[in-house]
Amino acid sequence: MSIQRTFSIIKPDATRRNLTGAINSKIESSGLRIIAQKRIQMSNTQASEFYKVHAERPFYNDLVSFMTSGPVVVQVLEGENAISAYREVMGATNPSMAAEGTIRKEFAENIEANSVHGSDSDENAAIEIAHFFNKDEIVG
Ligand code: ATP
Ligand code: MG
């Protein structure tokens, strides 16, 4: 067990439906701390780069359009085993497969518009955090 940081995005389907607070409440009730947060509009370049591991997938262009379709909230979360803990709070990628009580079960619209992103490894968390936050924006 160790204190980790993970990177989170509240996606455009959720900001559009005014769910930022409801999602933050789920994050905080799980014990994770939101130690940095800002609302931004992702550019096409940022979204393409962010999801480039999926560049060959059939849903890639749609995904980039979706992620730039409205504001997102980018966050740094901190806590005990934050990477896996947050993925548990998020629930499965496809909301129809997500467990009861998870963010995606409760709020996601479909497999694409699934309300939140969370890093999948320590290495990616560090890369993603550094991409969206300066060190002086993370005050703990
Ligand atoms: P994220 O990376 O956003 O945290 P994830 O790790 O659960 O989600 P990935 O497999 O990395 O899922 O997919 C990245 C994102 O691409 C998903 O969150 C979803 O928005 C979209 N996506 C994944 N699979 C599909 C699909 N079959 N059809 C449409 N969109 C998809
Ligand atoms: Mg992923």
Image: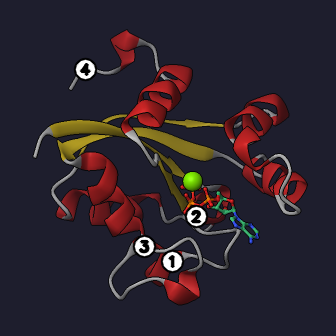
Instruction: Say if mark 3 contacts mark 1, CB within 8 Å.
Output: no
Q: Residues within 10 Å of mark 1 (few under 14, many from 20)?
A: many
The span from disc 2 to disc 3 (Cα, nearest Å) is 15 Å
Query: What label sits on residue 91 in the rendered view?
Result: 3
- Image coordinates of residue 61 in percent, x first then y, are 89, 53
The span from disc 1 to disc 2 (Cα, nearest Å) is 8 Å
Viewer-nearest of labels 3 and 1? Answer: 3
Query: What label sits on residue 19 in the rendered view?
Result: none
- Image coordinates of residue 101 in percent, x first then y, are 32, 83
Three-letter amino acid code of the residue under disc 3: Gly
Instruction: Say if mark 3 contacts mark 4, CB within 8 Å.
Output: no
Q: Which residue is mark 4?
A: 139
Q: Which residue is mark 2?
A: 14
The span from disc 3 to disc 4 (Cα, nearest Å) is 28 Å
Three-letter amino acid code of the residue under disc 4: Val
- Earlier in the chain: of badge 2 and badge 3, it is 2
